[in-house]
Amino acid sequence: MSRRPYIRPVSNTTWYMQNSRYRRYILREVTCLLVGFYCFLTIWALAVLAAGSPDRWAEFLRSQQNPVMVGVHAVALIYFLIYMTFDWFKLAPKAMPVQLGEKKASDRSIVVAHYVVWALLTAFVAWLVGVIP
Amino acid sequence: MSIAKKAVVWGLFAAGGTLSAFLFPALIGLFLLVAIGAVPPGLEFDRIYAFASHWVGKSVLFLVISLSLWHAAHRLRVVFHDFGVRKDKAVANAVYLVAAVGTVLTAFYLYRI
């Protein structure tokens, strides 16, 4: 080893700004904050529900009705779809290749299967809460 | 980390990621509907309470929330590293603690419903 090894000058804090692939990576990884946020929002809803009072539940629903939350949810939904859901589906064939006998299922079929299951699950949830009859 | 431990950590991470990738758009959509004042009939007290008190509803809620929390915590731990925080032990303790607290709260509230 040389006495003065070459150390690439890479910033610990801003390295992902140098390359569009890294930027995409970091935009994808920070979706974990949204997952955490919505988990705790749901836990809050469960806490209110556990009180067992219809009035407090109605009050909770009213407290969620404001323009700021509309903006937050709308942006979160679009961001989450692009960088979490669709990216997760895109990476699925690489993370979980499916062996069918001698061959492997094609990447495309795995991705399409994910979209189909996602559409069905979303429709099921919508049906469950009465958004679609 | 041992290889055996890594498999468990990775498995739970992937399970939580898959569940949140599939279900969170619908969940965020529900919060959006509530926010614009178009509360779906299924979120009225009687129906959502009935859903959350049934063992199937409880199981789904618990699995989705706890695994998603674990997924988010694990991912956030790596994100901290990516943003230049090099105290992995402290970060790991903090994020997993938050996920554990969320999991316990979920179990507690579901138990009381």
Image (cartoon, coloured by chain):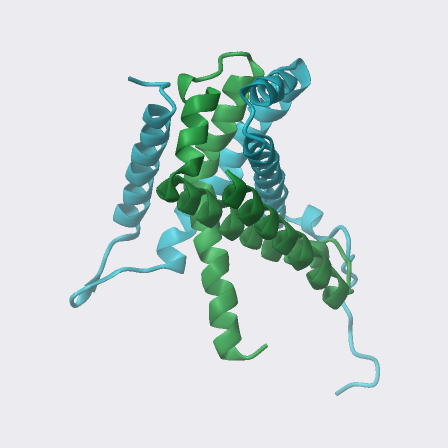
Chain colours: A cyan, B green
Q: Residue at (61%, 15%) from the top-left corner?
A: A62
Tell me: A125 left or right of A21: left
Please name whichever residue, B38 or A49, is drawn nearer the observer in this view of the structure.
Answer: A49
**Residue B35, position as x, y percentages in the image:** 58, 17
Q: Residue at (52%, 72%) from the top-left corner?
A: B6
Residue found farthest to the left: A101
Please name whichever residue, B92 or B112, is drawn nearer the observer in this view of the structure.
Answer: B112
Give the answer, above or below, for where B86 lies relative to A43: below
Tell me: A119 left or right of A102: right
Residue found farthest to the bottom: A1
Can residue B43 be seen? no
**Residue A20, position as x, y percentages in the image:** 60, 45
**Residue B4, position as x, y percentages in the image:** 48, 77
Please name whichever residue, A3 or A31, is drawn nearer the observer in this view of the structure.
Answer: A31
Q: Residue at (48%, 37%) from the top-left corner?
A: B24
Q: Quadrant of residue A4?
A: bottom right
Q: How many marks?
A: 0
Tell me: A102 left or right of B46: left
Give the answer, above or below, for where A21 lies relative to A94: above
Can residue B18 be seen? yes
Q: Residue at (41%, 24%) from the top-left corner?
A: B47
**Residue B88, position as x, y percentages in the image:** 73, 65
Residue found farthest to the right: A4
Q: Where, quadrant-wise, is the N terminus of chain B in this rendering? A: bottom right
Q: Quadrant of residue A10?
A: bottom right
Please name whichever residue, A89 or B49, is drawn nearer the observer in this view of the structure.
Answer: B49
